Image (cartoon, grey):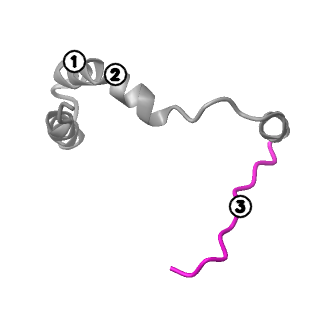
Amino acid sequence: MESISRLKSVLLNNLGSRGHGEQELFDELMLHKQRLLELFDVGQSSHQEQQELQSGECFAPVSTRKI
């Protein structure tokens, strides 16, 4: 599995550079596009989740477990 350390480095550099290096960041994002899509793929939402989103009343379950 390829490392994303280069992407992380480019992202951090761009956050601090005030508008320089956008093309480099874009290129790195495109290079890692598939991996990022897999990372953020949460699957289809249930009927209840779709209704909550449409109504604007989304609630995240609260964990009662102590950390």
Q: Amino acid at mark 3?
A: Pro
Q: Is residue 20 above or below residue 52?
A: above
Judging from the image, what secondary structure is the residue with disc 2 in?
A: helix
Residue at screen point 16% across, 28% down: 20
Q: Is residue 29 above or below residue 17?
A: above
> Mark number for residue 33?
2
Q: Earlier in the sequence, mark 3 or mark 2?
A: 2
Viewer-nearest of discs 1 and 2 = 2
Residue at screen point 21% across, 40% down: 8
Residue that protrudes farthest toward the front in the picture: 1
Task: Answer whether residue 38 is visible to the viewer in this image.
Answer: yes
How many angstroms separate mark 1 from mark 2 (CA)?
10 Å
Percent position (x, y) of residue 41?
A: 52, 31
Disc 3 vs disc 1: Cβ atoms closer than 8 Å? no
Q: Specify start and end residues of the magenta stretch as a single range.
A: 56-67
- Determine whether, in the image, residue 63 is placed left or right of residue 24: right
Q: Amino acid at mark 2?
A: Lys
Percent position (x, y) of residue 65?
A: 61, 77
> Is most of the magenta stretch helix, strand or loop?
loop
Looking at the image, how many numbered discs can be counted on the residues? Answer: 3
How many angstroms separate mark 3 from mark 2 (CA)?
30 Å
> Mark number for residue 61?
3
Q: Quadrant of residue 9?
A: top left
Give the residue number, with chain letter if any, for mark 1.
Answer: 27
